[in-house]
Image (cartoon, grey):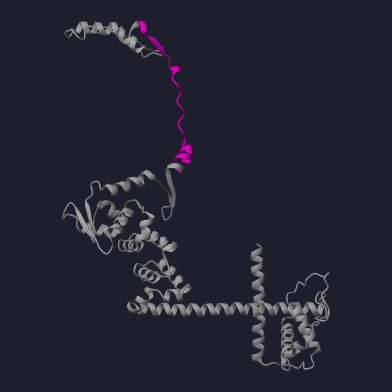
Amino acid sequence: MAQAAVAEIDTSWISSSPPSYDRSMQLLQENCAPVSCSTKIEVSINPSLSRSVSRKDFPIPPPLPDDSYYRRYHLQKVFSVTRSCGSHAGYSCVPKETVNTWDNLFEGGYLADVCIFTEDGGVIPAHSNVLSIASPVLKNLLKQQKGKSRHHSFSITGVPYDAARVFIRFLYSSRYEQEDMQKFALHLLVLSHVFLVPSLKLVCTQNLEHGLLTTDNVIDMIQLARLCDASRLNLLCMRLILKNFKAVSKSEGWKVMRQSNPKLEQELLESVVEADSQKQERLHKIEEKRIYLQLYDAMEALVHICRDGCRTIGPHDKDLDDTMGPCNFPACKGLESLVRHFAGCKTRVPGGCVHCKRMWQLLELHSRMCYEPDVCKVPLCRHFKEKVQQQSKKDEVKWKVLVSKVQAAKRAVNAFSSAAVV
């Protein structure tokens, strides 16, 4: 249709001399019909080639997405939504493109007004506004140079060029490569402390905690952690030293520290001794609680034997009855043999036989824990109740302490069992 329309237009006047105004208007009127703005839009190049287009011929556009659609799909796919803590708590939606923009700004150095010189001769371009916002130390440093020149410069010494570049990049976009962090974690920790960048210090501590902290470098790490005021890293180093002291004491770092920092060596040794004593005390308390719990079980088994008569143990010269189930009292078997010995021993006097002496002590302990001596079937329960009045105050205190600890051990076990069930 377009070729036919072009063929209908008279083009003979183009190659001739310029037409007059009247001739031009005549040609326009003959070849181009006016466009109407009514309901039907008339598009015509030649009256014979006119066609009508209605509004209903155009497709209906899709509806615009509402807020729920935007939040559900756009935010979850494009933005990284993180919860921020602090006095102004809220959500921070930072799109990946924005982070890339800041990264590209650092990489390109567009309109950079700061030159950062490193110790090995490297130069890093940067922007004073970004550095001032990211670090209060750099803000004061650049403020001192204000008015002297349009461009600012300062030096970062003690670290290689690549480590300084990773540090400056982090100030822009909070990005870093994992291989760079593994290589320059210690340098970045120092820079984060010197220039007061707590977010980078936290990142360095986390990376050192997961894989970078070993027995070979823990001595260097703990000294650096104390210099950089990294309390968590210092705690992790102390735990590693106390746990693997033999391996750490044989490392090169320990030998160097012994010469350069004897105070730290003395402190670590005292910590190891204190941790060892605490461990021994803890083990002693565990063993003590175990003994008190065994005594309580023996008291219960003693009442069970004397009151009910255990039928699953039987005489010492006969086999157990297979039809009977196991006894519910764990100390019943051992205590039953002790009772049989006590009943048949001819030197039953206190102190005459070791086993009998232990039995005398168990009987006296039971009498002090028994609250029903009149109906109790345990032998000599009432006898020991009367004997209490004849004992010295010192012995009485010892027995009270023993009874309280035995009862406390049982209460602790019961509380732990109840918590486990819940």
Image quarter (top left, top right, bottom left or bottom right) of the C terminus:
bottom right
Q: Front-most of 4 and 202?
A: 4
**Vertical side of 284 occupied by 14: above or below:** above
Report the span colored magenta: 48-75
**Vertical side of 388 occupied by 172: above or below:** above
The percent position of residue 286, horizontal first and vertical second, equals 60, 77
What residue appears at the point 29 percent right and 55 percent down from the top-left corner? 165
Using residue 47 as the reference point, say whether residue 215 is left or right of it.
Answer: right
Image quarter (top left, top right, bottom left or bottom right) of the N terminus:
top left
- Residue 50: image quadrant is top left
**Vertical side of 94 occupied by 240: above or below:** below
Using residue 86 as the reference point, say whether residue 358 is left or right of it.
Answer: right
Residue 50 falls inside the magenta stretch: yes
The percent position of residue 81, horizontal first and vertical second, equals 44, 47
What residue appears at the point 45 percent right and 17 percent down from the top-left corner? 56
What residue appears at the point 43 percent right and 55 percent down from the top-left corner? 85
Using residue 232 as the reference point, say whether residue 307 is left or right of it.
Answer: right
Residue 290 falls inside the magenta stretch: no
